[in-house]
Image (cartoon, rainbow, N blue to C red):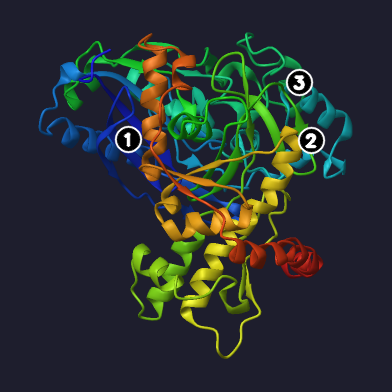
Amino acid sequence: MTSDDLCLSIDLGTGGPKVGLVTFDGQVMAHELHHVPTHFGDGGEATQDPELWWTLICESTKRLMRGPGISPDRVKAVAVTGQYASTVPVDEHGIPAGPCMTWLDTRGRPYSRAAIGGPVQGFNARKLWQFIRKTGGAPSTSGADPVGHILFLTNEQPELCARTRWFMEPVDYLTMRFSGVASGTHASRLAMWLTDNRRLDHYDYDQALLRAVGISGDRLPRLVPIGTVLGPVTKDVAVELGLNDDTAVLAALPDVHAAAYGAGATGLFDTHIALSTTSWVSCPVAKKKTDVIHSIAAVPGLTNHSYVVINNQDTGAKALEWLQGILAGRGENMSFDEMTALAATSPPGASGVIFTPWLAGERSPVDDRNARAGFTNLSITSSTADMIRAVLEGVAANSAWLFGYVEKFAGTKLAPVRLVGGGAKSALWCQIFADTLGCDVHQVLGPMVAQLRGMALMASVSLDRRTFEDLKNLETPVRVFHPIPDASRVYQERSGDLASLYQRDRKWRRRRKK
């Protein structure tokens, strides 16, 4: 390995793609971030344009390749990470046959419920046990995952299905655009819950699980081991993007895996929290395990013989972006930095204002798509600063609510915690997390591009430049935030407020939803 070697890393978030050139030791040399819109329609529709993703990624790559000191000879690999539990229908050449149904799309709800629904927490008990025993989880009865998406398309859009050769996860779709190879891994396809995860060396879909949901496996891409080199970029892609035609394309990983690599959290129980559009709490664990009640599972991990904890909170730093839009509508056009600076003028506890951050419902530690956000305890003296700080504190409190269950799941104290994602750029937000969790929080250097860095490190292992064990010895630069006792006491006194507010309003929300 030389310091000149680079990986073209792509992180396809829900908000849009990041594209970067990253050294194999994790230094992000240059990157771009682009926004893509989500189309929300009737019946739970939430789609994005996968052709737009590809166009933005290609344009970014061409600009990055023209940067100073960059040459095709330096770029040795292409590695993709990003959102999962979404579905892109593509033809035999990997070209989209229709829009991507994102993880927010619930149009498949009636078909998912018909396939696996029942009286046990909304599931057919026999099928639920069959899934959990083999996979660690199960498709959602909300329809907001690939099983629900495929059932919806099969039943309601037969013409689109007739044009479809493969139902792909977004990250696998992008690797196919680069390599021409249709593939997936246990990790990238984890949200289908159709592989027997007790056998991580068995690269096939489970036929009994396919039958349980009524899906044929003939349009699901073949499974390959994590770290597989799928082949070189296609000649057309090499010419268009200015890459050498022997540049290796690696099998994709979900963002939770890339974040663990990029945060330096690859050892057993090394914990990171993502403060991105969504949020999660994750760490590597020793074995497959499931907490059905709180939607926590151990799934195929960072290697082909390990597991990692997954869960998801549907609103993370997106809550601050949402408030930014609300304030802009009132003529208060503040940047992210200006908002957090103003929030710092409000005391810990936000002068009594509480924000519940469930703008898009919730998955963990409660699976409730009817859950909604709101401000509580506002008064005539409540200020904009109080409201912004309440959003920061509400998101941190929601993570802490989940964090307690993840610690029970892991069976050990999880500290320190590494924080990644765009929200982790804020020193104030990092301090609020430290005070709320009651433990040291490590702000990873360049938290917004942690996944780009993680995919370059994964590429260095896949191309035999270093071993996975070497990653544990790499120093990841961090800034450490220690809990402040007075602030921690305020947050500890209010630690149960979020769960209490959820329970208080649960029945009311269900009635209003109807």
Residue position marked by numbered label 3 in the rendering:
134
Q: Nearer the viewer, residue 338 or 278?
A: 338
Task: Please state if 76 lies on the left or on the right of 347 as rendered.
Answer: left
Q: In the rendered image, is residue 295 in sight?
A: no
Instruction: Give the number of the mark in front: 1 or 3.
Output: 3
User: What is the three-letter code of the residue carrying label 3?
Assistant: Lys
* Amino acid bearing label 2: Ile
Tell me the amino acid under the disc marked 1.
Trp
Badge 2 or badge 3: first in the primary sequence: 2
- Name the mark on residue 54: 1
User: Which is nearer the N-term, disc 1 or disc 3?
Assistant: 1
User: What residue sits 45% from the left and 75% below the top?
Assistant: 345
Whether residue 132 is visible to the viewer of this picture, yes or no, is yes
Residue ID for mark 2: 116
> What is the distance, in whole Å, between disc 1 and disc 3 at their CAs?
35 Å
Residue 171 x %, y %? 45, 30
Residue at the image position 41 percent from the left and 57 percent from the top = 426
In the image, residue 16 above or below residue 238:
below
> In the structure shown, which secondary structural element does the residue marked by tag 1 occupy?
helix
> Which is more toward the observer, 249 or 88?
249
